[in-house]
Amino acid sequence: MPDPKERRRDRVMTIMLGGTMLLLLAGLVRVMHLETVPNDRLDANLGRRTRSSVDFAFRGPILDRRGRVLAASVLGRDLAVDVKVLRGNGVDRRDRVAQEISNVTGLDSTQVLDRLRQRDDARYVRLARAEDLPYLEPDRLRKLTVEGERVRGIILDRRPVRRCLEDSAAAPLIGDVRAVEWGPAPRELDRLASNVTVDVAGLRRWCEQREIPADTGIRAVEAHLADVLGIGPGEIRRRLEDSTRPVVLASAIRLSPEIVRSVRSFQIGQRTPPRHLLLDITDREGLTRLMRRYPIQRGASGVEAAREGILQARHGTLKRTVAATGDTLFVDDGDFEPGRDGDAVMLTIDLEIQRYAESRLREAIDDHHAVGGWIVVADPLTGEILAAVDVLHNDRARDRGGWREIDLDPARDPGGLGPSHQRNRVWTDTFEPGSTFKALFWSWAIDQGAAQPDEILPTPGGGFANPGHVFTSGRHRRRIRDTYGHEDADFRKSLIKSLNTGMAFVAERMTSGQMQEMITRFGLRDRTGIDMGPAEQVAMVSSPENWHRLYTQLSVSFGQEISMTPLQLVRAFCAIARPDGGVPLLNLVRPSEIQTFNTPAPRAISSESVRVTRETLEQVVGPDGTGRKAASDRYRIFGKSGTPQMNRYDLQEDGSWKSNGHHEDRYMPNFIAGAPFDAPRLIVACGLQDPDKHAGANLDGNGMGYGGGYSAGRVVRDVIDFTLVYLGVPSDKTADANAIVDAR
Amino acid sequence: MRSGQIIALLVLTLFVFGVVMVASARLTPLPRAEATIRVDQDTHTRAYIVDESEGSPSMLAGRRVFDTLLGKDGRLALLALAALLVGAFVPVERLASLGGLLSPAPWLLATIVGLLLMTLVVGEQAHGATRWLRLGPVRFQPSEVAKWGLPAIVAWHCLRHADGMHRLFTGFAPPVVLSAIVCVLIAKEDLGTAVLVMSVSMLMVLAAGARWWHVAMVVPAGILAFVGFVVASPYRINRITAFLEPFRDAQDTGYQVIQSMGAIAGGGFGGRGLGHSLQKFDYLPFDHTDFIFAIICEELGFFGAAMIVAIFLGILVCGWAIVTGRSTPVEPEERGRAVPPFSALFGFGIVLTFGLQAVINIAVVTGMAPTKGIALPLVSQGGTGWVLTAFSLGLLISIDRQAWRHWMRSESHASRDRFASPPAVAMLERA
């Protein structure tokens, strides 16, 4: 029998050690509890174990046709200063630091000091944007010293900035990316809670803009969402049908990032619809947080905006797992998403031609005290635009030789920051071409057999004081005058002397269908093919229902009651410059493949009509023609001038503009020509806006300087000469090309 | 297999585990590790960079293995194993039976008190507490000596007054007062160890024959003393506050326990994998010492935690079997005499100290107790702790060996009496 003391000892020891073992097991249970039961409070208080940084990607460069860089993105730095640090330790160093910063950056030291002194309690004060510091030397700023002591508190915040070739004449064409959008990387967006919300109306608009049948697009969306969300296609169709507002098909709660990514990357006809048409981010706080982190450049105008999809860069992210000290430990699989630089866009523009065209245009604008002007240089065979310049002076205080300003002009808005800001009128604004259009009508009439070149027409004589001719249609009567009357001129002379009556007599013989087909065949109802977005305009002319035989029909024959963009005029004129009489699509951006020499184009007129028209237009530039000032010593030029009156617009109370006839003494002289004669390589069109009409003004001092042949014609001539020599096209006249160029 | 041998194996397992986990917890990021992927914003290039000066990855791995096995921790573990071996051959009962000046208990007590007093005067400070003492090249914590030494003194006293332990003043009070004095000396800098030591002493006295109401009477005084020590030190108040409301000041007082619980939660059931802890990279303070259990949970998940607890339970079960005489195959009524009283009580003190230390550590790490400076025995990195714990467990093994030897001797006598067969006796003796 055991001793009671021993039994008690045994019992106490067993209880105590057993209890200890139970406590150990309790500890294990607690471990399991911590490991398996989520604890939001614990997670929230642990702090982050990762640091994310942006792998900056750069927007693609824009190059000219020879690969010269016109615009490119580089890494710039916003400059900011921590004022508190500058004023630290009781010593105010702002004066000296402002001076030193000014020395290094070129910023005005007074302005820098003013910024630093604006608020004494401020922390971070931005001194300059990266765009304003193109030649910043970051190392010099980082090592800045004042009285031998390193300056602290200078912050250089990196971000990509767009740099345009400073003296690039193509700058207005290239457009602007200064509107910087702050957006997250797509992958980061996928992690945000998002509803699948379909905007049917938006999708329809998007499809229509891309010439995708809207119904086909919507059906594709329905099928894809049915597959991804596991909802029946019929159910989706029922919910989307007749909806005018975005419809939520699935809430964020049940969506994984994979589903969101699948919806976002969905394509219709190899194009990805904008994210917001299918997804609605519900995590606004997360979105705001992300938006602050990633600067994304977006094109605001010109090529930058129109080729956004090609140029756009996608920033990458690098998420590092770090120690508490901030040292990087590792990068998990999938946590490094490299950025993707945007692709390059090569324009058909040649920088040298563009530069010369712009300088010559500006010279003409100054010579003629004009408000502005435009010029287009194109290759009729390939449809490539070699130069496209639009100049508009918004400075109303500019000296115009006493020629008074027009009070109301929608093309010029105060300060240059209104609706016309960054608008390139070469394709965004239409104008009434006037007599320049006669070349197209003349070739069409010949081609249609409505008239023969040598056919005598009953045009009225009388010189400047000619009475014109009264045309009738039913009970309607209309008097049409010529600027200078030539009695009984033939149809050829009608074009050479630019007789409105001559054109009207022939137009009278034609049906309205023939006239309307002319507009179609010369491509004036279509966009030119440059694909520069919805801002590109097409010709404006009366619809067939409103077509009036006496007014529309006759007016169109001499370039009135019809307006078109300069690019459309150039494209239509290609028919006369091409051997096949075709109207090619124009290009502003070079496609990836090498362009063939002669781009197939729908034929507007026959080759025979081309030859006859070209011969006649050469005489327009001849000694007896209205465009004689455009004659070149080097090349045989064929062209046509026009001096239409400017359209008049009145500003309405609601801020809109209303057309109100024409100005009496305001003109839009223009000229279009091609060269060389036998195998044209160029078409150049130029227009000037509101040149000085004072008697004795301008180059010739004869009061005729505002005429298209006098003003724009000379510009066209010079640009043709320069460009053809630059392109190495041999002269088809006897004069030495180099001598001409040297003489200029 | 004898319980002592199982304890030896379990201790060896714990050491291997401890050395590996301490090495893992002490991993530091490579210098310039941020260069693993470098994105140069100026040139806009990305590069994977391996620093030549650091050698190739395979060389790095080799160096890590070498450092782990034969580094400082490995050498300390070997020293601790040697201590275990030495302890296993210490004649516990014979030393306890020595009397007069040869009796080791008074000397041990004098040494403990002397070392603790020296700590108060010339102790070295580390992590805000003066717990360390340097004697020549050796730097150790006297409180560790007291923790493992005091059970021997208490057991010695209980043996001397075995018949009077049920009396308050002559049996119960002396060892309790003695322990209290020692604990007061410890508690100034290490309240957790003091509580542990006092608890073990009280339970030993209880096992030795003291009455329950004696112990119950002392508990309020102990609680008062505990509160007094807490109130006297603001950082202890903070620890209590952090235990009660860890999220109230998550970045300061509650930081450690939150990071510890975060490590366990972060690992999840399956763990992040050996070496893949994130918390050890300066997020969790004392990750390779007092909070090594959190790192084990984070890296090895529930499996690692269960393995550690299972090993501790194994040692406790074996220790219980040894001190209660169940280790040897004696008849149940003979168990009480299978292990001599001193050995049984001393062994109980060792097992209880070991077990309670593990319990307290795990409770602290999992947020079930206020933060204390109590290490996880044989796993948390610490030279003094490893050597003294291993030596103490060695003594437990020695107690088991003595019990087996005693049983075999008695068994051989019984056989001789039954069979008088010399070959059978020889066989038993050989066994």
Image (tube, rainbow, N blue to C red):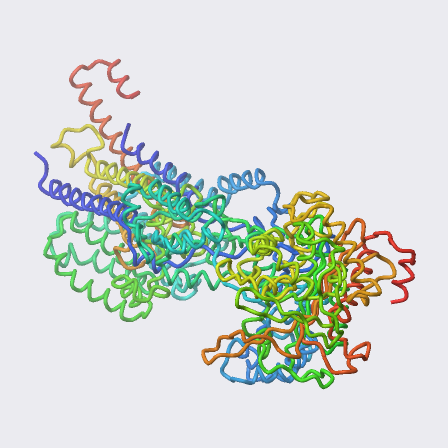
Residue B161 seen in the current view: yes
Q: Is A278 rendered above or below residue B180?
A: above
Residue A648 placement: quadrant: bottom right
Left or right of B178? Residue A79 is right
The quadrant in which the N terminus of chain A is found is top left
The quadrant in which the C terminus of chain A is found is bottom right
Nearest the viewer among B239 and A577 is A577
The residue shown at (28%, 21%) is B429
Nearest the viewer among B207 and A482 is A482
Residue B387 seen in the current view: no
Location of residue A16 in the rendering, given as x and y in whole percent from the top left corner: 18, 46
Nearest the viewer among B256 and B383 is B256
Nearest the viewer among B73 and A377 is A377
Location of residue A292 in the rendering, given as x and y in whole percent from the top left corner: 47, 64
Location of residue B209 in the rendering, given as x and y in whole percent from the top left corner: 13, 48
Left or right of B63? Residue A226 is left
